[in-house]
């Protein structure tokens, strides 16, 4: 019983600690590209993730189908909220590309007709990550941005002999202490959009992220299994972590133990039992009655008889 009580107190403490955490998230989904074929899922992915994170007590900054100007404005709004946050999270769905090992997130108005355009039309992924790591001890990044990217092909063609610096998919990102970066697929590979409302990666995230009582690294193992199954092994989500402890986005709810119902008292059995002991001269008879029927109809009389028998025993002892 003592162990159960201690466990309940620990759960209560953990739940109150989780509730006290300040959590901030940035969610961006870009589908409506103006100069290449539009993507099907990223805006749906972003809306789904925003709802999911709000249910996990995150204060969510959300943007969908953002131009570069709006993208920078949304990121700045998020960065302004990082001060004092315990957990920061960034989710991006849309086009992304790597050039010379650096990753860039692509707004909907980008054309990327030349290498010079890259610095003026795309956003470095590290811009967001560096701001998070500067302000927050626990940082979680999810990049569903490894889709086949015609903008990267445009850029590669314009670079001629230097086109080899435009890599396939996204490049591996190093993380500072306390950060986890999760990609929709392994570095250098291309992720799939899927046939449903959401991409395979986001579908799995929406299902498993914040599993009650489960560490986020275990959440991502379950995400990886689902994506492998959904893509028939073509896509393998990958992550890079330097977290220094467990990150549980949703604590197990404390459930108070249910007391077993007391069996109903049969008044006829109680009466028969009382009739069998009421003339007795042993205190044990009446104590046994009270243990069985503490609120019984003869409980007061039983207590009186116990007091009488104790007094009688004292008198006999004194003689």
Image (cartoon, rainbow, N blue to C red):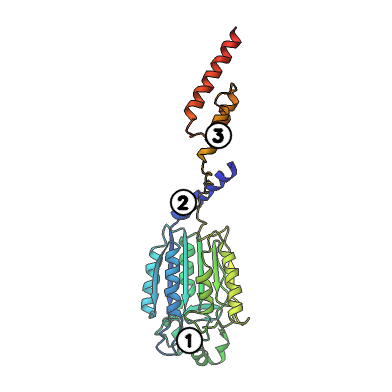
> Which is closer to the viewer, label 1 or label 3?
3
Occupied quadrant, residue 107: bottom left
Is residue 186 visible in this depiction of the protein?
no
Report the front residue among 175 and 47. 47
Residue 272: image tag: 3
Q: Residues within 10 Å of mark 1 (few under 14, many from 20)?
A: some
SS for tag 3? helix
SS for tag 2? helix
Residues marked 2 and 1 touching at CB (< 8 Å):
no
Report the front residue among 154 and 295. 295
x and y, in percent, of residue 255 in the image? 51, 52
Q: Which residue is mark 1?
A: 115
Q: Earlier in the sequence, mark 2 or mark 1?
A: 2
Q: Residue at x 52, y 22 (%)?
A: 305
x and y, in percent, of residue 263 in the image? 53, 44
Q: Which residue is mark 2?
A: 16
Q: Which quarter of the figure is the C terminus placed in?
A: top right
Q: Residue at x 59, y 73 (%)?
A: 224
> Which is closer to the viewer, label 2 or label 1?
2
Q: Residue at x 59, y 27 (%)?
A: 285
Q: CA distance from mark 3 to mark 2?
A: 53 Å
**Vertical comparison of 42 with 162: above or below:** above
């Amino acid at each position: 019983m003592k162990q159960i009580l201690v466990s309940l107190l620990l759960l209560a403490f953990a739940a109150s600690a989780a509730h006290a955490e300040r959590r901030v998230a940035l969610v961006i989904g870009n589908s409506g590209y103006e100069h290449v074929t539009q993507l099907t899922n990223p805006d749906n992915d972003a809306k789904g993730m925003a709802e999911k994170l709000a249910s996990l007590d995150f204060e969510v900054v959300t943007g969908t189908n953002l131009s570069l100007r709006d993208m920078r404005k949304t990121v700045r709004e998020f960065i302004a909220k990082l001060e004092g946050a315990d957990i920061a999270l960034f989710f991006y769905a849309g086009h992304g590309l790597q050039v010379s090992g650096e990753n860039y997130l692509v707004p909907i108005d980008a054309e990327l007709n030349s290498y010079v355009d890259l610095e003026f039309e795309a956003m470095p992924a590290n811009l967001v990550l560096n701001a998070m790591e500067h302000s927050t001890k626990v940082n979680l990044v999810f990049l569903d941005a490894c889709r086949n990217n015609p903008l990267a092909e445009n850029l590669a063609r314009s670079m001629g002999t230097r086109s080899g610096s435009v890599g396939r998919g996204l490049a591996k990102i190093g993380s500072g202490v306390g950060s986890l970066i999760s990609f929709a697929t392994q570095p250098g590979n291309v992720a799939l959009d899927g046939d449903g409302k959401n991409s395979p990666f986001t579908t799995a995230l929406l299902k498993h992220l914040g599993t009650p009582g489960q560490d986020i690294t275990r959440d991502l193992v379950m995400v990886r299994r689902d994506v492998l199954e959904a893509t028939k092994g073509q896509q393998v989500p990958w992550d890079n972590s330097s977290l220094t402890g467990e990150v549980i986005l949703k604590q197990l709810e404390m459930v108070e133990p249910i007391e077993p119902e007391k069996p109903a008292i049969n008044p006829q059995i109680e009466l028969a039992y009382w009739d069998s002991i009421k003339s007795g001269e042993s205190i044990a008879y009446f104590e046994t009655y009270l243990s069985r029927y503490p609120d019984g109809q003869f409980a007061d009389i039983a207590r009186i008889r116990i007091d009488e028998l104790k007094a009688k025993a004292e008198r006999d002892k004194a003689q």
